[in-house]
Image (spheres, grey):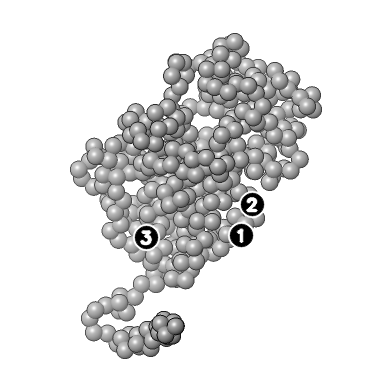
Amino acid sequence: MASNVKRVVLAYSGGLDTSVILRWLQDTYNCEVITFTADIGQGEELGPAKKKAETMGIREIFVEDLREEFVRDYVFPMFRGNALYEGTYLMGTAIARPLIAKRQIEIAQDMGADAVSHGATGKGNDQVRFELGYYALDPSIKIIAPWREWNLSSRTKLIDFAKKHQIPVTKDKLGEPPYSQDANLLHISSEGKVLEDPWEEPDESVFSRTVNPMSAPNKSTEIIIDFERGDPTGINNKKLSPASLLEELNVLGGKNGIGRVDIVENRFIGMKSRGVYETPGGTILFIARRAIESLTLDRGAMHQKDELMPRYSQLIYNGFWFAPEREMLQSLIDRASQLVTGSVRLKLYKGNVIVTGRKSPNSLYRQDVVTFEDDSVYDQRDAEGFIKLNALRLKLGKKN
């Protein structure tokens, strides 16, 4: 099996797990490893990952800034669908995996590689997300999932392997394992350690992107977000690129303690998992977008989107970004977003996002219709026939 693999593209972070995987691939498959490291807003320098790959003998190293593509082509389309998994989770991890998978396949095709590899464990959702993406984009690609093949089944064994092969191990990896974290421009997730007990309250050391809501400023921060055809385009009358806009919202939300969520979620593979998430910018954006939709979307269109949202969210969470049914739903969502243009005014205060105003050139709101003052637009007596028509089946049913 190993001799059939000549070149493999590894999604490489430079951390302990993927560095061990890199050496393990070389030893087990006797193949050339090509590393791919993406900047999607983790908040850390990628230079060390490149240098580490070089010290481990890697010749083909790809380090790419994908922040704009990540937000523009993945985060924003997902937010157009108001996606929320199990009513709580904004899916910062799930939405990042399709982009990584896509670039790995593109690099594999460009470099003549016959395999791809990732660092996701056999217990999590990410292995599914990565591999569904790989197969959707290149059905003939070979996938190597080390956590399902090797016998390095614990953090201690990983560290022992690293020491044996002269792979640098940072101090926080020694002794008790740290929180397992995943970060990008949309969120930071934390799992493991004391968080494995769903009754234990997260320590403040878990959080890095947001202040404690109770310690946030006593004065609210007021902002205005502009939208065009469903996507945010600026803050406080300043046009911003997708990545810059989300980054700015992260700062504003973080200062005001916005976006912390502690949930137990149902993983696709069958088990429950406890995770602590920080999604400050995404939380603001989710609420703001809903506010502008309430003004611009027809009731039937909005309710249709709401009915489809759980299914759409589940597809993304489970890794079916490239599936035809997700693309079909995306077409519907994008069509519904064409008139979602305008501005939303918000107050950010101690973990809360408070909508204080919304306006749009495409507004369906008619003050002359809803007013309680005298008007000549709506005859209130018309409501009687509407009510009687809708009550007919209820009246007939009562006789049985």
The residue beneath circle 3 is 291
Q: Nearer the viewer, residue 224 or 115?
A: 115
Percent coordinates x, y for residue 291 in the rendering: 37, 60
Q: Quadrant of the N terminus?
A: top right
Callout 1 crowding tier (Cα within 10 Å): few <14, some 14–19, many ≥20: few
At a point 67% along the width and 27% down the height, the residue shown is 149
Q: Are marks 3 and 2 in contact (CB under 8 Å)?
A: no
Height in image: 394 above or below 127?
A: below
Q: CA distance from mark 1 to mark 3?
A: 25 Å
Q: Secondary structure at mark 1?
A: helix
Q: Secondary structure at mark 2?
A: loop
Callout 3 crowding tier (Cα within 10 Å): few <14, some 14–19, many ≥20: many
Q: Which mark is residue 323?
A: 2
Q: Are marks 1 and 3 in contact (CB under 8 Å)?
A: no
Task: Determine which quarter of the picture holds residue 28.
Answer: top right
Q: Amino acid at mark 2?
A: Ala
Query: Disc 1 or 2, which lies upstream in sequence?
Result: 2
Callout 2 crowding tier (Cα within 10 Å): few <14, some 14–19, many ≥20: some
Residue at the outermost right position: 4
Q: Nearer the viewer, residue 130 or 371?
A: 130
Task: Determine which quarter of the picture holds residue 259.
Answer: top left
Q: Secondary structure at mark 3?
A: helix
Q: Amino acid at mark 3?
A: Ala
The residue beneath circle 1 is 328
Q: Nearer the viewer, mark 1 or mark 3?
A: 1
Residue 292 appears in view: yes
Q: Amino acid at mark 1?
A: Met
Q: Quadrant of the C terminus?
A: bottom left
